[in-house]
Image (cartoon, grey):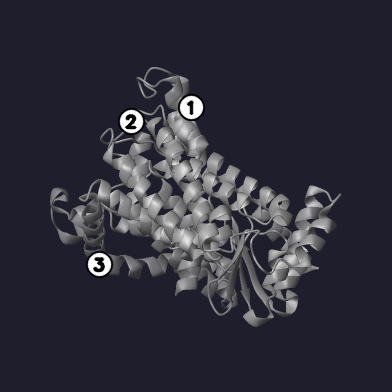
Amino acid sequence: MKAYLQKIGRSLMLPVAVLPAAAILMGIGYWIDHDGWGSGNPVAAFLIKAGSSIIDNMSILFAVGVALGMSKNKDGSAALSGLVAYLVVTTLLGVDSVAMLQGIDVDSVNPAFAKIGNQFIGIISGLIASVMYNRFSHVKLPDALAFFSGKRLVPIMTAVAMLFASAILFFVWPAIFNALVSFGKAISNLDFVGAGLYGFFNRLLIPTGLHHALNSVFWFDVAGINDIGNFWSGEGTKGVTGMYQAGFFPIMMFGLPAAALAIYHTAKPSKKKQIAALMMAAAFAAFFTGVTEPLEFAFMFLAPMLFVVHAALTGLSLAIAAFFHWTAGFGFSAGFVDFFLSSSLPLANKPFMLILQGLVFAVIYYFLFRFLIIKFDLKTPGRGDDDDEESDDFEASKEGATVENKFALMAAQIYEGLGGDANVTSVDNCITRLRLEVKDMNAVDQNKIKATGVPGINIVGPQSIQVIVGTQVQFVADEIEKIRKA
């Protein structure tokens, strides 16, 4: 179950990766016409509408992305089936359809059905479509119906499956919706304390990949909070809307880069050069784009104490930002790009105070991490007792290699460390991690994989392993696929 939920989280990365485009378009549009929100300038209106076309249809993107990501062959017919599934359920359970089925006035329909077109339903649609693809994509029908065999059968079976799913949701969805709303309200009613609790659990769930499920309640229109959508559309309360986003900026732009500096300063002298390259790249990714996994995974398993401290400081940061009503928002993650674009939006409230807060958190992160690492002799990168020669050999082999060859060298050693063709059964990747299935975890040579300089390795099941590479993971995954097909 855990591995299945992680796979869903990975699949969500495809549609979520589209959000930066929306953030850029809407940010530039509002920068051009920040008083009229596009009404006073056709260019601004064009950009804002283009961005909102993505934000407003995230549920459809989720349906397509999850169907594609959860299907065996990542085939386009699975993605099409995800769209079919979503259209069937949202049409059958739309307010007008429900009013007709129940024989009541539209105004008397349960409010839950007015929110049927949300990201949660998008995920459900994508999952059902992927199941239909995995089950029917290779089915052969009699000659008279041969045209509808195989992949052409998948959208048809998906539509049939969604008829049954819609019948179930007709009775179940109001209860699910009310439960989600109650959960969201329970946290949101706690004001800044609730924001802090959300931030704390958001980070704690990172190792499992289940933080996406928690995020959907607060960031999207699942329980009526829709913090991201409302912030970027300007629909909300200034100083309140954005409270589940703002506190991440001080952590990702300042706190974690300061933690990287502490890790570098406490590394063994012989390892400082190697750790400097790793920490610099990870810190820049965190600051500029808000992608923190390469840095977090660098110490998450080597020093769990530091990760719990990091989660607590993240919760504290969200609580402080919410308490003082300092708000900024992001379309992708809390990095400099989104901060710059969102700081001029109408619901941004004293966003530059988040920079001051970030500088304070940078000092806290640096000295607290450095103290804990030295005090408890934590084996953060560059301080391990197993600093073998393989790492030096790998670094030497990269000297003079082209960028493409470096990815090929890394992929080859990672694949060899995994046990090669005899052990690897599945290779996939999300935004920063290789996600792999192996036959025998005992055949995996973790030291050989770590020698490539990857930030970390995460064992998530008896046959499931993740290798945290960073934002260029796609190129490594492509090279591994070349090796497997050779």
In the depicted structure, whether residue 481 falls above or below residue 37: below
Q: Is residue 431 visible?
A: no
Instruction: Evaluate if marks 2 and 1 touch, with contact meaning CB atoms under 8 Å apart.
Output: no
Please tell me the numbered disc located at residue 349.
2
Task: Tell me residue 78's x, y (percent).
Answer: 53, 62
Q: Amino acid at mark 3?
A: Val
> Looking at the image, which residue sits at the far front?
375
Q: Is residue 392 left or right of residue 129?
A: right
> Where is the C terminus found, in terms of image quarters?
bottom right
Q: Is residue 213 left or right of residue 287?
A: left
Give the number of the mark in front: 2 or 1: 2
Give the number of the mark in front: 2 or 3: 2
Q: Which residue is mark 3?
A: 172
Q: Amino acid at mark 1?
A: Ile
Please tell me the numbered disc located at residue 28.
1
Task: Tell me residue 331's x, y (percent).
Answer: 45, 41
